[in-house]
Amino acid sequence: MVARPITAIIFTFLLFFLFLHTASPALVGEDEDRSVLLVFKASVSGDPKGALAGWGSPDVCNWTGVACDMKATRRRVVKLILSEQELFGEVSPALGNLSHLRTLNLSGNHFAGSIPPELGNLSYLKFLDVSLNMLNGSIPPELGNLSHLKFLDVSSNMLAWTIPPELGNLSRLKFLDVSSNTLAGTVPPELGNLSRLSSLDLSGNVFNDFVGAVPWELGKLSRLKQLSLSGNQLEGSIPVELALMRSLAYLNLGRNNLSGNIPSTIFCNLSALHYVEMSSNSLNGKIPIRADCSLPKLTSLVLWSNNLHGGIPPALSNSTNLRWLLLQSNYLDGELPSNDMFSGMRSLKYLHLSFNSLSAANSRNNTGLEPFFASLTNCTGLKELGVAGNDIADRIPSVVGRLPPGLMQLHLEFNRIFGPIPANIFNLTNLNLLNLSHNLLDGSIPQGIASMRQLEQLHLSNNLLSGDIPPYLGTIPRLGFIDFSQNQLTGAIPPSIMQCVTLQNLDLSHNKLQGKIPDSLSRMSGLLYLNLAGNLLSGAIPMTIGEVVKLEMLNLSSNHLSGTIPPQLSTCIELVYLDVSCNGLTGPLPLSLEKAVSLRHVNFSYNDFSGEVPSGGVFAGFRADAFLGNAGLCARTKSMTPPLARCNGAASHRRVVLLVVVTATSFMLAIIGLTVLDANTGGGEVCRSFKRECDVLRQTRHRNLVRVVTTCSQPDFHAIVLPLMANGSLESHLYPRVGGPGRGMDLAWLVSIAGDIAEGLTYLHHYAPVRVVHCDLKPSNVLLDDDMTAVVADFGIARMVKDIGDDDNNTGSADPCNSTAGLLQGSVGYIAPEYGLGGRSSREGDVYSFGVMLLELITGKRPTDVLFQGGLTLHDWVRRHHPHDVTDIIARSWLATTDEMLSAVQANNIVVKLMELGIACTQHSPMVRPTMVEVCHAIALLKDSFSS
């Protein structure tokens, strides 16, 4: 009797338990997923947008970024999408317990740590994207267990080690991107098993040891449409099996170490090709496009910087959609193509055949260039044309004036073109760059040049041009670069040329110009580079030179100038290079130049200067050979090498008198300077620069960016107060006074400084609340704090940029004080080449400036060094010596010869990798430069070399 109620109770309990676990599986599964997500939230250390603020409410399916399968019996989390939420922290391994998850997207955040191997447990996962983070470690081989996966993107992280061959098990995968990491090893041939793959990107792992051959097994990917292996260190030949990928539309093998011939079947079998790039390799042989090859869809053929020879294939005329044909820097020979080649290329926009061995046909009849230019008149969309550096001996034919009116750049330099410049070349009114330098052109510069209203760069140097400089140059509104050096020009410098307020580079050196330097020089407020050396100029240096406050290089040597050096020159606070040698200048050297803190190279030799050579400030580091041929000069100390004559008491008395005069002058200049800052006296530019800098600094916080103590802005005064940097600028350490700091810089310090700068820029470009382009990165704008940590400073011309997804109210694009449109931003030697061609300031431009500065740190050579003339750049010089002449590259650097932490082999390896990084950052094309995120990753690996 008693047992029956007890049995009933137990039975009821079992029924209730069975109800919980069978009748409500959705409730139980939802609770499990909720717990997993809360564990993930706990691993997030920063959530500035508050994306996870609502995580904790009863309904997990309504949490931000969470989606559920809403079927009554299967209420489980199937999607977790938190892309571009600026989340910090690590990816929790607990996510591997979201057993029904189909989509996981954590891209565009700041996650660090490794990719959890537990993600390999997500058996239903179809989409996995963790790109654009700061993940490190390896790619887990466990991801090869995701049998349903169709999309995998781990690009733009800090992932190292090898690509696991287990990824070849993902039989349903259609998209695989592991680019822009620091992977090593080889391309696993198992990737050839991904039979459904349509896009494969393994590019941008150049900063590690991602080497080996291109596996022939990739040819089995018959559905592949896009293949990018660029920017690595792959070697060997291009496998012929790639021609089996009949669906391939995009092929990029550029910037590797590939050699051998290009298989002809690549072009003849792959009729779906749109884009082919194999630039910056060591490929040889001919361009294998046979007459029977049909490439109807080809839009881009990029083969520059290889060892290709032979002619340009006539079969390219069948490519009616071709827009980009870039074949420069090879060994192509034969004649320039004529009508038969380009008659069908109606879509052609960019044609570069420069620096080959091509010649002009029928040159003995002086008609060699005419059929070539005539064949291009049908290419109505042509924007850039380069045939520089070939073996062309001919006149510029009149047909050049009938080139497409939309042409923006014309490069004919480094040939043997002779005769006058045809007047009708100026019918090309949309040109923004005309380069005819290093030829044999004679006659005068046509007056019609003034009709080229869009012109920004004009290069006519190293010719035989004569006559006067056209006075109408000053009316061209956007002109920023003029180089007429090494000609036979006569007459005076027209004052009207000084009306070019946009002019930043003016080189009239080594001509026969006479007369005075115009006083109207002061109008060129943006001028950075002025070279008038080697002429017949006379008179005094105009006092208005002090109003060209941005001037960095001034060369007035080898003229007939007289008078004194105006003390106003010291107001050119950016001045780095000053040469007034071989003139008839007199009087004392201005004491005010002691305060020209940027001045690094001077030459006062062979004049009639007298008095005591200043010994303070920057003068303490100048050698006596900068003062040769001035019998009246003397020095108070013997520290100068070689020593000058010792000064007597009279000289000391003159110094006291001069000090009084200069002090009074400096006081007056200070009063005048306070009036630039007066908003009521033309302070509009100061307003714009000041507001821009305040906007940038107010919205950025980073250990490698200068912090603001306070700001002061009143109607008649603007100031930004920054902390005292006792260790000065990076420039002051690179180019110190004699005996000062910076000699024997060790490699670890160099890598540390480079890393600090890179991290500051990475924050500005990618992670700041408002994305910022610095626009003027150089050593003098990098400061060193008490711990010798580098901080990036001087955002006076920075530009705030709008990213996709940025709020309009968070950018300064609408404020005219933030606009840099129409201005060539930066400093001579550090300016990206596209800026000079009218390009807008960009992150890629900052990357270029960083690369120049990195090469400067390695080589000890300024980008404005006298070695880099005639078109040679610091990038070119390093690339010529890399990697076999490392000793020559660092011969003038500050690097110590030994490093206690590293062996010679290790040190050499790190220097080579730094050079490769600098070369990559200073590539001419902005498209192929790495991002600052990639640069940071590369430097982080080099730092690990020291710690390990």
Image (cartoon, rainbow, N blue to C red):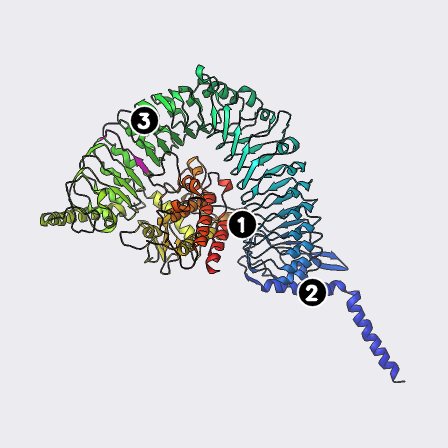
Circle 3 SS class:
loop
> How far is the residue under mark 3 from the one under mark 1?
49 Å
Query: Residue at (32%, 51%) from the top-left corner?
Result: 732
Circle 1 SS class:
loop
**CA neighbours of label 2 inside 10 A, class few (<14), some (14 to 19), many (20+):** some
Query: Label 3 belongs to which residue?
Result: 487
> Between tags 1 and 2, which lies in front?
1
Relative to residue 659, is residue 867 depicted above or below?
A: above
Query: Label 2 belongs to which residue?
Result: 32
> Seen in the image, is 533 located left or right of residue 420?
left
Decide which of 443, 631 is in the foreground and name it: 631
Query: Label 1 belongs to which residue?
Result: 209
- Can residue 483 be found in the magenta stretch? no
Residue segment shown in magenta: 529-537
| Label whose residue precedes the other's in the sequence (3 or 1) | 1
**CA neighbours of label 3 inside 10 A, class few (<14), some (14 to 19), many (20+):** many
Check disc 1 and give the amino acid type: Asp
> Seen in the image, is 909 located left or right of residue 197?
left
| Label whose residue precedes the other's in the sequence (2 or 3) | 2
Circle 2 SS class:
helix
> How far is the residue under mark 2 from the one under mark 3?
81 Å
> Between tags 3 and 1, which lies in front?
1
Q: Is residue 691 visible?
A: no
> Seen in the image, is 5 located left or right of residue 700?
right
Q: Is residue 547 visible?
A: yes
> Seen in the image, is 787 located left or right of residue 384?
left
Query: Residue at (50%, 45%) from the top-left corner?
Result: 930
Residue farthest along the bottom direction in this orientation? 2
Check disc 3 and give the amino acid type: Asn
Relative to residue 852, is residue 321 depicted above or below?
A: above
The kind of secondary structure the magenta stretch mainly shows is loop
Decide which of 799, 259 is in the foreground and name it: 259
